[in-house]
Image (cartoon, helix red, strand yellow):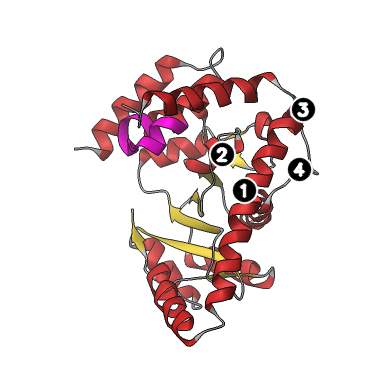
Amino acid sequence: MMRDKTHAEFIERWASYVKSVPRKEWKSKLDSFTNAQFEKSLAFYERLKKTEKGRVVLKRLKEERVKAKEY
Amino acid sequence: MERGIGDRNILDKFAEEVCKIIDKHVKYIVVSGFVAISHGRFRTTEDIDMIIEKISFEKFNKMHFELIKRGFECLQSSKSEEIYDYLDNKDSVRYVRQGTFLPPEMEIKFAKDEIDELQLKTRKKLAFTGLNIWFSSIEINIAFKEEYLGTDKDKEDASHLRKIYQDEINENEITKMKEMIRKLRMK
């Protein structure tokens, strides 16, 4: 069961679109979305670096990410 | 099939750079979320999952130092002996661009059973993605996402891949893989 009907419809509609248009068309949309997410996240971390409290949070986040994951 | 080299986003560039280095040292595959995303699934990810053949420490050491030389670092440790121990103990290790602990990251693990070995043996370069990367087959990805991973996100990834490859998918292969997953991973 997916999240809800309209969400499932979006997945279906978007996949149909990807299949039906030239690669450069869907790729440019996806690239803008992907780059924006990373850029926004990076800007947030840069802001954190500017305050003492932010630096503490950054340190905590880094420690969390370094933990190994068992698979 | 239309291919493009001028249309790389942050995630694509990172993936291709790391894969190019890894490819020189060991057989690898990229699996799971990045497979769906490379086929146009409208979402992103922080980590790209990679499975590599189990290799000796000496081979791993060479690969690790090339990754360092080319501007990447391992989050778990800077010592290759320690990183190798993680892998050998069935833990994944994560490489990011040097000087940051931030995504994107390549999450690397050793092949651990015959399913992973089969995935490596049947790996493919998928023209639809336009990327010079070895992927595990679409059927195996769908089987894992539907049978084993099973979150909403995974089911949606599988649904997207099914739509993209609806005329080409080998359903018998998916069924066979699901049986193998149940037998080896869900006992």
| C-beta proximity under 8 Å, tags 1 and 2 | yes
The percent coordinates of residue A34 (x first, y second) are 62, 48
Q: Label 2 marks which chain's residue?
A: B
**Along the polypeptide, which appears first: circle 3 or circle 2?**
3
Question: What type is the residue that disc 1 sits on?
Answer: Thr
User: Could you say which is closer to the camera, residue B43 or residue B103?
Assistant: B43
- Decide whether residue B149 is among the magenta residues: yes
Q: Nearer the viewer, mark 4 or mark 1?
A: 1
Question: What type is the residue that disc 2 sits on?
Answer: Ile
The answer to which image quadrant residue B130 occupies is: top right
Tell if the residue under mark 1 belongs to the same chain as the one under mark 2.
no
> Disc 1 designates what residue?
A34
Question: What type is the residue that disc 3 sits on?
Answer: Glu
Q: Nearer the viewer, mark 3 or mark 4?
A: 4
Secondary element at image label 1 = helix
The answer to which image quadrant residue B140 occupies is: top left
Q: Label 4 marks which chain's residue?
A: B
For the record, the magenta segment spans B145-157
Above or below — where is B70 with respect to A57?
above
Q: Which mark is residue B7?
A: 4
Question: What type is the residue that disc 4 sits on?
Answer: Asp
Q: Which mark is residue B37?
A: 2
Q: Which mark is residue B107?
A: none
Secondary element at image label 2 = helix
* Magenta span dominant secondary structure: helix
Secondary element at image label 4 = loop
Q: Give the Cα separation between the discs numbered 1 and 2.
A: 10 Å
Q: Give the Cα separation between the discs numbered 3 and 1.
A: 21 Å
The percent coordinates of residue A1 (x first, y second) are 31, 26
